[in-house]
Image: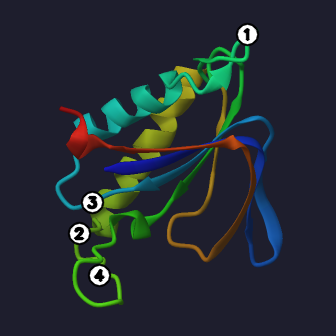
Amino acid sequence: MRIVIQRVLNASVSIDNRLYSTINQGLMILVGVASGDTEQDMEWLAAKAANMRIFDDENGVMNRSVIDVEGEVLAVSQFTLNASTKKGNRPSYIHAAGHDVAIPLYEKFCERMQELVGREVKRGVFGADMQVSLINDGPVTIIVDSKLKE
């Protein structure tokens, strides 16, 4: 399982030219579920994202988490995070999990993040054609892969 965490001033998801979800200061998280991913991967990534110290403290040092700053979270499923680009110029998505695995793990990730941060986690719609807008603050963008935790 792989996530891309972006520290944002605001972020939103639109579907069919209609605003679906929006947040102010916090984290925009893209979530990619791969074949073979488990609830343990999801748990580890949710804890990592919720506690990642990427917000400035009073000294301007990145030392505070989204929990500490009472920030918001927007999580969007994105199977393309599991693209294989080893051969040719057309990405292969053979490693992306099917809906039967990906949807439950994405939903559980959102629910777990909600428990950890203590506020509603806004979402996209799994499998929808979404337009994502954000103002990346910093910019701060962190990629975390549960297969690389050791």
- Say whether marks 4 and 3 touch (CB < 8 Å): no
Residue 42's spot in the image, x, y percent? 33, 39
- Say whether marks 2 and 4 touch (CB < 8 Å): yes
How many neighbours does mark 1 have within 10 angstroms: few (below 14), some (14-19), or many (20 or more)?
A: few
Q: Secondary structure at mark 4?
A: loop
Residue 144's spot in the image, x, y percent? 38, 43
Q: Label 2 belongs to which residue?
A: 95
How many neighbours does mark 2 have within 10 angstroms: few (below 14), some (14-19), or many (20 or more)?
A: some
What amino acid is found at the position of numbered circle 4 in the picture?
Ser
Q: Label 4 belongs to which residue?
A: 92
Q: Residue furthest top?
A: 58
- Give left or right: position of 39 versus 80: left
- Give left or right: position of 92 versus 130: left
Query: In terms of depth relative to the viewer, which is nearer, 140 or 5?
Result: 140
Task: Give the CA separation, mark 4 to mark 1.
Answer: 44 Å
Q: Residue at x 17, y 55 (%)?
A: 36
Q: Residue at x 27, y 60 (%)?
A: 34
Q: Label 3 belongs to which residue?
A: 34
What amino acid is found at the position of numbered circle 3 in the picture?
Ala
Q: Quadrant of residue 88?
A: bottom left
In the image, which is nearer the foreground, mark 4 or mark 3?
A: 4
Q: Say whether disc 4 or disc 3 marks the residue closer to the N-terminus.
A: 3
Q: Label 1 belongs to which residue?
A: 59
What amino acid is found at the position of numbered circle 1 in the picture?
Asn
Q: Residue at x 29, y 63 (%)?
A: 100
- Give left or right: position of 102 versus 25: left
Q: Say whether disc 4 or disc 1 marks the residue closer to the N-terminus.
A: 1
Q: Secondary structure at mark 3?
A: loop
Q: Looking at the picture, does residue 47 appear above or below residue 127?
A: above
